[in-house]
Amino acid sequence: EVHLEESGGGLVQPGGSLRLSCKASGFTFSNYDMSWARQTPGNGLEWISRIKSIDGSSYYLDSVKGRFTISRDNARNMLYLQMNNLKPEDTAVYYCVSYTLSARGQGTQVIVSS
């Protein structure tokens, strides 16, 4: 059974940083591209970043480019999102997602507020 579990969210002031983690299990993690997405109340899931399995290439939503960094540790089945210079508009529930497997975790809340 595919299982994704996020952690690392919390309350941070504007300009601050957080590192989100996602533990994957139930599938061969290294074989799959992985993504982070976020959702705010009343809105759909917004893709924000993707990292490829084959070469680790990464892609970002324009609004987070230069501030967020996605990474993965295939030996530990872990996906990460380093978020710097956070802004109030980054407030959302963040999800670890495999679009190929149609799977996502339960999410971790990020609140950016002074």
Image (cartoon, rainbow, N blue to C red):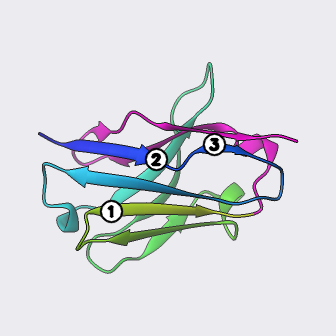
Q: Amino acid at mark 1?
A: Met
Residue picked out by circle 3: 10
What amino acid is at disc 3?
A: Gly
Q: What distance separates the C-alpha of mark 2 from that of mark 3?
A: 9 Å
Residue extending farthest bottom: 55
The residue type indicated by label 2 comes to Ser
Determine whether, in the image, residue 86 is placed left or right of residue 75. Answer: right
Earlier-in-chain disc, 2 versus 1: 2
Query: Which residue is tagged 1?
Result: 78
* Callout 1 crowding tier (Cα within 10 Å): few <14, some 14–19, many ≥20: some
Instruction: Give the percent coordinates (x, y) of residue 69.
Output: 56, 69
**Looking at the image, is mark 3 or mark 1 nearer the viewer?**
3
- Measured as percent of width and height from the top left, residue 35 is found at 41, 54
Compared with 36, 43 (above or below) is: above
Pointers 2 and 3 in contact (CB under 8 A)? no
Question: Element at badge 2?
Answer: strand
Q: Secondary structure at mark 3?
A: strand
Q: Which residue is mark 2?
A: 7
